[in-house]
Image (cartoon, grey):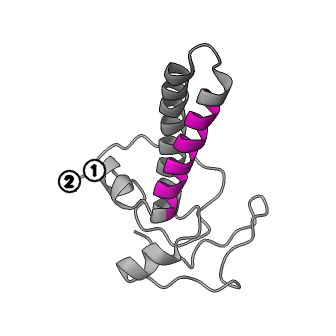
């Protein structure tokens, strides 16, 4: 018997539109794949939330600023994690990841249409 692992994954309604780098990425792979844009988004949401919390929390400005900054950091981290996962799994454009791992990024004509059930996913490389 081959090594067969049961992997719990959320079913998707459509196949990935971009090359798949990793079908089931680990937490380390996802965090290691975060781009400067993801980190910038995380820091920007954190900063904006902290400023808003300080501005809106009249009697207790500093604790409110810290609380909102913490919540903003959590929201930014979740969005960055989601974006990095989607790029690894082929659900978002991943030209940078393709060049890093030696895959060819498809041209616009090779990307399947997003119509329901009318996709041709035989062109992308199985990972």
At 45% across and 64% down in the image, what residue appears? Answer: 35
User: Mark 1: which secondary structure?
Assistant: loop
Task: In the rendered structure, find residue 31 and report the number of the disc placed on it.
Answer: none
User: Mark 2: which secondary structure?
Assistant: loop
At 48% across and 38% down in the image, what residue appears? Answer: 73
Across and down, in percent, residue 110 comes to 65, 83
At 43% across and 82% down in the image, what residue appears? Answer: 99
Q: Are marks 1 and 2 in contact (CB under 8 Å)?
A: yes
At 65% across and 29% down in the image, what residue appears? Answer: 55
Across and down, in percent, residue 103 comes to 43, 82
- On the question of residue 82 being in view, the answer is no
Quadrant in the picture for the C terminus: bottom left
Most distant residue in the right direction: 115
**On screen, residue 51 above or below 83:** above
49 in magenta:
yes
Could you say which quadrant of the image residue 15 lies in?
A: bottom right
* Magenta stretch, residue numbers: 37-53
40 in magenta:
yes
Residue 76 in the figure: left or right of residue 25: right
Could you say which quadrant of the image residue 18 lies in?
A: bottom right
Task: In the rendered structure, find residue 4 and report the number of the disc placed on it.
Answer: 1
Task: In the rendered structure, find residue 1 and report the number of the disc placed on it.
Answer: 2
Quadrant in the picture for the N terminus: bottom left
Within 10 Å of disc 1 (Cα), the crowding (few <14, some 14-19, many 20+) is few
Q: Nearer the viewer, residue 1 or 28?
A: 28
**Magenta portion: prevailing SS class:** helix
- On the question of residue 109 being in view, the answer is yes
Q: Nearer the viewer, residue 104 or 57?
A: 57
Could you say which quadrant of the image residue 49 lies in?
A: top right
**On screen, residue 11 above or below 3:** above
Within 10 Å of disc 2 (Cα), the crowding (few <14, some 14-19, many 20+) is few
């Amino acid at each position: 018997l081959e090594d067969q692992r049961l992997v719990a994954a959320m079913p998707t309604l459509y196949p990935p539109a971009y090359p798949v780098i990793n079908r089931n990425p680990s937490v380390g792979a996802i965090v290691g794949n975060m781009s400067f844009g993801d980190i910038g988004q995380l820091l920007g949401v954190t900063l904006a939330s902290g400023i808003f919390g300080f501005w809106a929390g009249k009697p207790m400005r500093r604790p409110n600023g810290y609380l909102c900054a913490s919540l903003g950091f959590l929201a930014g981290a979740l969005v960055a994690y989601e974006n990095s996962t989607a790029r690894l799994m082929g659900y978002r454009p991943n030209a940078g990841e393709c060049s890093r791992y030696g895959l060819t990024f498809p041209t616009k004509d090779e990307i399947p249409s997003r119509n329901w059930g009318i996709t041709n996913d035989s062109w992308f490389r199985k990972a």
